[in-house]
Amino acid sequence: MTEVTLTIDGMPVTVAEGTLVIRAAETVGVQIPRFCDHPLLAPVGACRQCLVDIPDAGNGRGFPKPQASCTIPVAEGMVVETNNATASKAQQGIMEFLLVNHPLDCPVCDKGGECPLQNQAMSNGQGETRFDGVKRTFAKPISLSPNILLDRERCIVCQRCTRFAAEIPGDPGITLLERGAQQQIGVAAGKDFSSYFSGNVIQICPVGALTSAEYRFRSRPFDLVSIPGVAEHDACGAAIRIDHRRGRVLRRLAGNDPEVNEEWISDKDRFAFRYVDAADRLRYPMVREESGELRPASWLEAFDLAARGLAAAGAAVGVLPGGRGTLEDAAGYAAFARETLAGADVDFRARPLSAEETEFLAAQVRGAGPVTYADLDAASDVVLVGLEPEDEAGTIFLRLRKRRPATGSGSVRIRTVAPLLSPGSAKLGAELVRCAPGAEAAVIGKLTEVTEESVILVGERLATSPGALAVAAELARKRGAKLAWVPRRAGDRGAVEAGAFPLTEHERDADQIIDGVLTGDVRALVVGGVDPDDTADPAAFLAALDAADFVVSLELRESEVTKRADVVLPVAAVTEKAGTYLTWEGRRRPFPQVFNLPATYSDAQILAQIARRYDAHSETGGFEARSARTSTTGTPSGGFEARSARTSTTDPLVEVRGAPATSLETTGAAFHLATWKLMIDNGRMQVGDKAYSATARPAAALLSRKNVIRFGTTVTITGDRGSITMPAREAEVAEDVVWVPSNSTGRGVLADLASPGSTVEVAPA
Amino acid sequence: MNTELLPVLTANWGDERAWTLGAYRARGGYEALEKARGMEPEDVVEAVKASGLRGRGGAGFPTGMKWGFLPPLDEGPAAGKPRYLVVNADESEPGTCKDIPLMMASPHTLIEGVAISAHAIRAQHAFIYLRGEVLHVYRRLLAAAREAREAGLLGDLEVIVHAGAGAYICGEETALLDSLEGRRGQPRLRPPFPAVAGLYASPTVINNAESIATVPAIIKNGADWFAGLGTEKSNGVGIFSLSGHVTRPGQYEAPLGITLRELLDLAGGVRAGHELKFWTPGGSSTPLFTAEHLDVPLDFESVSAAGSMLGTRALQIFDETVCVVRAVLRWTEFYKHESCGKCTPCREGTYWLAQVLARLEKGQGSEADLDLLLDQCDNILGRSFCALGDGATSPITSSIKYFRQEYVDHLARGGCPFDLAASTAWASSGFGARKLAPQPPQAPPVEVRALASLETKATEEDR
């Protein structure tokens, strides 16, 4: 890279060729005032605040007029004055113009105290305005979306928001309207600002023009305490800033981490934090009376009862931590199962899973060398399988979008193996490798042009696609491509590394634990943050909770699990404990505690307390149960046989479970069910902000044009677990595929509609 | 110094149905195209370079040099991309009225110029971006393009006539390109320049309508003929548009370097019974001139040396009945209305300037407001994103330079000292303060042009 040396305010500066003057100045600590400029957005030169004097452009001649330093690249020998009389007058003149039509309502503005306009008016303004005329006024606020409100009077039309929307997530729903002093931001004709990343515009707005419905008028920046954090909604590990006041989180902002999320976060990471303060939040332990009622209990009593109940079951205990915990919590669950309970089964997976996936996690994920965001930046080819980054991994989505073909900056080829080209994939400029749900293995096997420059990202949904994970791993191995597993939950990768899943053939996975409870082989359950409706068979899960002799629930809020538990132990929320998440890359993302509350314990701390009391009880009641378990290990039960039958298949391609395909041929009315979770849906951690929830994409089934014509625009879909009636929309899907959002209606697809991998019928509603 | 008119583009305006293909060809139209087709494209570019033709849209950039900026066809970043020719016919500046009469009277002159220029730059698509309000011109251009195509004159060239939606900013070439692409018309950041990445990010030549319409005459008569006209650095002929308080307003085509005194002689002088007070040499964006500048040669260098710009040769004549504060306020309101809003100084500055001027015109405020105006202009000029903001300051700074006392008089009197009716076209009807000689009723625009062409014909005959 060629370097260029220039002089800024008398200081020599050496930067890469092509660097903008405003960036070069930053490297020597010279802050040129600016509004429209943003290092992650293309330069536009609109606000003119960053004018500087360039007495020598590097060729011995100067510019006769001040130049916008955000659009002018450096040149060898250039001389830049950012603070001389010419530059100062220019900057003060622009500042005065900016304030002509600004309401100057800083005392009542949410941005007051952290406002670039306010700050720079102090540093680069004249203090007093000479404008004594009539300001233009607008009705305010107006809604850009159910969540984002705009005060057009405060707006200085720097276009950061519209440029963000168009350039970063590719959701150009907002645009400039009118002209001159009437120019304003508004919703583009025929569009809406439905973006999963809309909240970023509030943060990058250099004035108080954009506010969110829930935070608006709630607080002043100088009353807030800021703590860095890590977003807990996906496996991307986005850096966030948590702003709190008087024991409550008021808002969350994007942190600045160039290696991970740069300066952007999804709306879910930004707005979905009020679940912690939900009305059903558990605040004290509870134990079940003989009468069947739950009653409040002291921690000591609850620990003691939990230890006693588990000891009675010996090792015939299933531990289901869920995928939301920290690395420390996952390690706590794993140790509790393997050491304290001396060989109990543990599995973090609170979703459909398979034995193939268990092998894949052990062989390809656990301890695997990292594939990182930087690899996505460098790859020439990215293959997405069973993963929709916009819905399931927002940071990956934005990272890949930076390299979509249209930007031309070392563009990448992106292929997505999916039943349809989702809106997110379209925004990535991805090529669709069409694939019926369940047939991924065959399609991956046929992928060409995969090289060492390729990165294959496989989503957790691939667990239920027979053979797919093995074929993907084989493809990566043969071609030297990088392979990474991208789960949905923040704690998933940490749980894999902590070993909170079956590590030997003799351990039960989550499904087998539930089977075991129903057959009587497993007598007690320790359940962490698991939503039964997320599991492969919600009805079986609930039945298992009812059937188990003893259930310990470690939960944040009242749930179907706590309703059935014998001991309910409230756990610390993510803000109430320090911890570490591992991103999908395996990157450690430690975060500090925000609130230090009395008598509030993390999952790991609670398990340690139970463990301390366990041995005393196991002396008496636990022996029988444990010996029973030992004998079970010697002669594998039906569950194990079934699994070894599955894993014995050497070529995964041969064993494509045929149920969907054959039933399709026989009945003719059967559809493959394609489904994934939209980013904003009915998830339990997304409650508490109605304005945010209102930005969810409406639930609709996607069918081919022919099928929409055939069935109409409202359809009833019927599967082996029930029926869902919802609007139908046309999409580029195969004639025998219907796509439904996993958790946007009722209790979700797994509880209300169909079992994983099964087929459904579609009929007019 | 040349004192006579020299009709080239305007020569056929008085012909019977001059806008038809038949009438145009009867005068030798499209012969230049035939000649150009027999030349190598590079030779056509060379001819235009040698002619010294400078952009007629105001800036005066050499047209041939602009064509020469196109990147190579078959290598580099533009390899494989089409080239486009775009004609800027979005004539919207107050006072400027040359392209619209040209396209109205003789649209084939432009179409022929487009065909030759497209041949020269190897473009297969040409766009004429026309101001949307002039529906009659739009129809004539459409008809002319159709006639030429049906007559087989255009070959492979596709000529698209596009009507804009009415925004002054779309006359700025990069805003025009955005508008032509269906986007919001706002100027683009340069580089890349249109020659490298213009319309649809492809190499694009964008020229003013009069510039392109001049090309056939250059090809037909030779570069030397054109280079021999006008002054040393401002070659050739140009259309001078006289409007306002002048006896015979209209288009006067003459070699560059003619003076307003000569043009006024040809146009019958300032409105009878009145004298010249101030005038614009090139539209409202060029600093005002006064009677002391009557003998400034109207070429790029001389006008610039005298403190203004030749611009579009839109000579608006104002006699002594006109309040300069009022005129400047009207122009400023125009700029405020037309500012696209992209950059701060132009958007907010014009908004503020209009308020200060409106107050001054009413005789309110103080003399300090004049310094405030000048300082505001200083903060806009050269600070705005494009030339629109610069243009907005020209009438204000130049009017304060030449007529500061008139502003002060407004303040002293607490209002405008002028009889506003006296400056109107109907002042002679007795409504105004003075009794003037009877004037013919105001002619509609088309007849004004006819008058102009009659004038040019008369001069031809005189020779």
Image: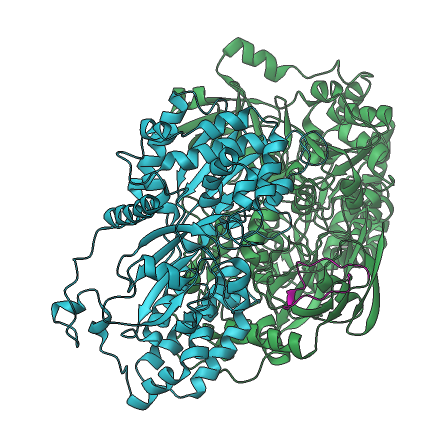
Task: Please name the residue shown 57% across and 49% down the image.
Answer: A684
Residue A589 drawn at (x, y percent): 78, 55
What is the tally of numbered marks visible in this picture? Answer: 0
Examine the rendered structure and indicate whether residue B434 appears above or below residue A586.
below
Task: Please name the residue shown 27% across and 57% down the image.
Answer: B248
Residue B207 drawn at (x, y percent): 51, 44
Residue A66 colored in magenta in the image: yes
Name of the residue lying farthest toward the top? A666
Relative horizontal placement of residue B168, taking residue A627 as reference (left or right): left
Relative horizontal placement of residue A428, taking residue B372 as reference (left or right): right
- In this view of the protein, which residue sits in the foreground, A108 or A387? A108
| Residue bounds of the magenta highlight | A59-76
Name of the residue lying farthest toward the left? B430
Residue A655 seen by the camera: yes
Task: Please name the residue shown 65% across and 76% down the image.
Answer: A86
Name of the residue lying farthest toward the front? B463
Task: Please name the residue shown 61% across and 21% down the image.
Answer: A436
Examine the rendered structure and indicate whether residue A314 appears above or below residue B36.
below
Relative horizontal placement of residue B460, taking residue A473 as reference (left or right): left
Residue A258 drawn at (x, y percent): 75, 55
For the colour cyan, the matching chain is B
- Classify residue B264 by image quadrant: bottom left
Residue A681 seen by the camera: no
Residue A60 colored in magenta in the image: yes
Principal secondary structure, stretch drawn in magenta: loop
Tint of chain A: green
- In this view of the protein, which residue sits in the foreground, A381 or A126? A126
